[in-house]
């Protein structure tokens, strides 16, 4: 029977502790704040979406009564096209404003609480959030048009957050 062989155990001294970074030892790198901002944006949109949908429905109810047929909607549009299309435009912009508000909250979170973040991180978080919603909506082409606006909202909010952070 063969004798048992054991792996050698290396005796080494413990590694020296790394010097804490500028933001502390527990502070993540700045790019980690990009997905964190996207998570904040998605959660904020989940909270705002129901109210936005309800408000859009109420706005549309001013022109269109419930349970209309396609022919009835076409007749209303022929009778008063300006008010019908204006109402549809306003009702459609409410969820968009809710989305941009939630992206802004995510960007502000990045700028305010990320020790080494800047407005660029808010911009990238806004782009990630809008692209995530593009994927969730089944690659709806019109969602791609929202990406630059989400990037601008994330940038502006992160810039405001960094200014507040720097003053504190």
Image (cartoon, grey):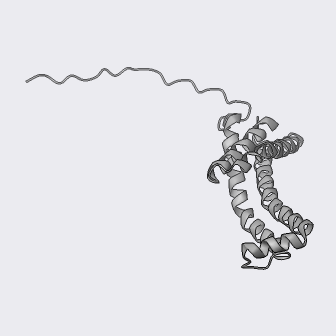
40 up-or-down from 52: above or below: above
Image quarter (top left, top right, bottom left or bottom right) of the N terminus: top left
Identify which residue is drawn at 75% across, 63% down: 48
Residue 29: image x %, image y %? 68, 34
Residue 90 as seen in the image, left or right of residue 133:
right
- Of residues 153 and 133, the one nearer the viewer is 133
Residue 53: image x %, image y %? 75, 67
Residue 14 as seen in the image, left or right of residue 148:
left
Residue 67: image x %, image y %? 72, 79
131 up-or-down from 89: above or below: above
140 up-or-down from 74: above or below: above
Residue 114: image x %, image y %? 75, 41
Identify which residue is drawn at 85% across, 61% down: 89
Identify which residue is drawn at 83% across, 46% down: 153
| Residue farthest left in this picture | 1
- Of residues 64 and 127, the one nearer the viewer is 64
**Quarter of the rendering containing residue 168:** top right
- Of residues 43 and 81, the one nearer the viewer is 81
**Quarter of the rendering containing residue 124:** top right
């Amino acid at each position: 029977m063969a004798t048992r062989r054991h792996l050698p155990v290396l005796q080494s001294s413990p590694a020296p502790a790394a010097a804490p970074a500028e933001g502390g030892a527990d502070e993540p790198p700045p790019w980690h704040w990009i997905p964190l901002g996207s998570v904040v944006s998605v959660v904020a949109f989940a909270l705002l979406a129901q109210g936005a949908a309800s408000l859009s429905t109420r706005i549309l109810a001013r022109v269109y009564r419930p349970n209309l047929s396609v022919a009835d909607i076409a007749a209303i549009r022929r009778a008063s096209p300006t008010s019908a299309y204006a109402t549809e435009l306003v009702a459609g912009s409410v969820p968009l404003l809710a989305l941009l508000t939630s992206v802004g909250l995510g960007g502000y979170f990045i700028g305010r609480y990320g020790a080494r973040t800047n407005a660029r991180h808010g911009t990238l978080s806004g782009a990630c959030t809008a692209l995530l919603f593009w994927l969730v909506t089944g690659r709806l082409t019109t969602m791609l048009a929202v990406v630059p606006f989400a990037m601008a909202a994330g940038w502006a909010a992160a810039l405001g957050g960094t200014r507040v952070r720097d003053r504190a």
